[in-house]
Image (cartoon, rainbow, N blue to C red):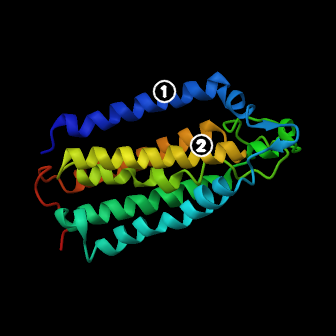
Amino acid sequence: MYPLRTTYKPLLWTLLCLACVILWDASGFDLLLARPWGSGQGFALKDNWFLSNVLHEGARRAAWLPTLWLVIGVWKPTAVLRRLSRLQRVQWAGTTLLALAAIATFKQLSHTSCPWDLAEFGGHASWVSHWSLGMRDGGPGRCFPAGHASAGFAFVSGYFALRGVSIAQARAWLAGALLVGFVLGAAQQLRGAHFMSHTLWTGWLCWTIAWLVDAAVRKLYPAAPDAPRELAS
């Protein structure tokens, strides 16, 4: 059986991070952080070449490379994937795709508009909390959570797949995924595409999806953490 710390420690981190994100939402810091970069004429860095072409379009395309590596690695593993069982590889690839799909779906259903759509920053929408369900802000919506940041955060799933093999590699992968997610989220914030809360909620959702999938796998396949966890034939 899995030790309790392996099962419940991620739950504690999940709840702690949830509390922090909720506190951020309640603080009103979103607008405070957006105002240095935007004005009534819009966001000066909206069309910045590096932010738009490298950290936005370039990073979005580049994110498909590790995704394809994970999917192909289910059948033909390379690098660290060779140390994982088939089930662990399926979990890693499947969870990553699930997180990307979930964030994209939430975003399409959202009535929350981007900062650059707000009247304060040259648009015509009003500021409305993204948790004011059913209320429209007068803008195009579809801006919550931060879809672009999920190109980094979705890969936190690697932490759960790797920690049974090497906790050091698992933590390194987690740190890398979080770093990329926050960098991409910050780039979009500078452009006026997202508030910080959009990025934070994306990170929390991707982590929670990965944790829930891992918990389900451990429930269905209760092998020891360091033993191969293969799909039932």
Where residue 62 sits in the image (x, y, percent)?
Answer: 50, 65
- The residue positioned 66% from the left and 26% from the top of the image is 29
Classify residue 127 as left or right of residue 195: right
* Residues at circles 2 and 1 in contact by the CB criterion of under 8 Å: no
Where residue 211 sits in the image (x, y, percent)?
Answer: 35, 46
| Figure check: 113 above or below 88 | above
Asked if residue 211 shows in the view, the reply is: no
Q: Secondary structure at mark 1?
A: helix
Q: Earlier in the sequence, mark 2 or mark 1?
A: 1
- The residue positioned 47% from the left and 49% from the top of the image is 180
Where residue 25 sits in the image (x, y, percent)?
Answer: 62, 29
Q: Camera-side residue: 132 or 129?
A: 129
Where is mark 1, residue-wise?
19
| Figure check: 110 above or below 76 | above
Classify residue 99 as left or right of residue 217: right
| Figure check: 115 above or below 77 | above
Quarter the N terminus occupies: top left
Where residue 174 sits in the image (x, y, percent)?
Answer: 35, 46
| Figure check: 4 above or below 90 | above
Quarter the C terminus occupies: bottom left
Q: Nearer the viewer, mark 2 or mark 1?
A: 2
Label 2 to label 1: alpha-carbon separation: 21 Å
Q: Camera-side residue: 32 or 101?
A: 32
> How busy is the neighbourhood of tag 1: few (under 14 within 10 Å), some, or many (20 plus)?
few
Q: Secondary structure at mark 2?
A: helix
Q: Which mark is residue 186?
A: 2
